Image (tube, rainbow, N blue to C red):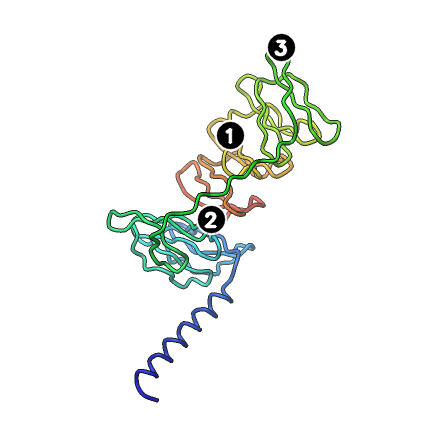
Amino acid sequence: MNRPAFLVLLAVLALAAKWASAQTAPTRLVPFRQGSKWGYADRTRRLVLPLHYDEAGPFVGEIAWVRQGQLYGYIDGGGNPITPVQYTRAASFQQGRATVELQGETFDIDVSGHRLTEPAAPAPEEEPLEQGDLVRNNGKVGFRFTVGSASVPAEYDEIRENYNGLLFVRQGAKWGIINGKGKLVQPLAYDAVRTSGNLVLPLVQRGGLWGYLDEEGNTLTELRYRQADPFQGDVARVVLPDGQVGYIDANGQEFFE
């Protein structure tokens, strides 16, 4: 075999090995922080990818951003680099593309790390499935569910749907949660509710601290986070009162120590 053909064969074998590694890479890993270093753990909190990073983001489609020092790069589910650690900003992938910043220039890359020149397609518009209709009486608002006979009396100042079977209700300055049967499952005790982003696992706040509810409106986590983001897939980023950052899963389990 001549040398050029041999080099081509080596390149093909290397690509095949990388592809096989990506196909067998662990999935459903969660960013895990131990002290000031980050790696990735499985759902039992067993460390799978070592603590090599200064910060780590969630896997989206088996790709996650990681930070070393002040620069960001991307890895696959096996910890293999997809891009060099070179970006000054990096976002998670959405619809097969991620926005990065390099040498002061902002642009999108694809899942192979190649720069994209065409603009992103507009996100498809989704009409939320409404659960019923607001009912107004004497300046107050109630709710009548479309399915079943449940209704909420017109005694609230504001009602918002989460389009997943729950209602956020407000009396005065306090918020509570009503389920699809018209039952108040969380009392009017919260200072704020998050009504944007992923609302499947709602966010509630009291006294400056945030916590999560489950899909039925029951308590998922204590009110213990200074900042809490909506879930991205089945993980969410939280900030503790002391400023430490970590992630939790959809069961409320914390992946930091």
222 up-or-down from 184: above or below: below
Q: What element carries label 2?
A: loop
What residue does disc 1 label? 205
Q: Where is residue 251 in the image (x, y as percent from the top left)?
A: 58, 45
The three-letter amino acid code for the residue at tag 3 is Asn
Which badge, 1 or 3, is on the more N-terminal residue? 3
Identify the secondary structure beneath mark 1.
strand
Query: Quick one: label 2 or label 1, which is nearer the N terminus?
Result: 1
Q: Residue at x 64, y 25 (%)?
A: 133
Residue 181's spot in the image, x, y percent? 71, 30
Gap between marks 2 and 1 measured at Cα: 22 Å
Q: Is residue 96 left or right of residue 2?
A: right
Amino acid tagged 1? Gln
Find out whether the residues at labels 2 and 1 contact each other: C-beta distance under 8 Å. no
Disc sitting over residue 256 in the figure: 2
Amino acid type at mark 2 = Phe
The residue closer to the viewer here, 8 or 223, is 8
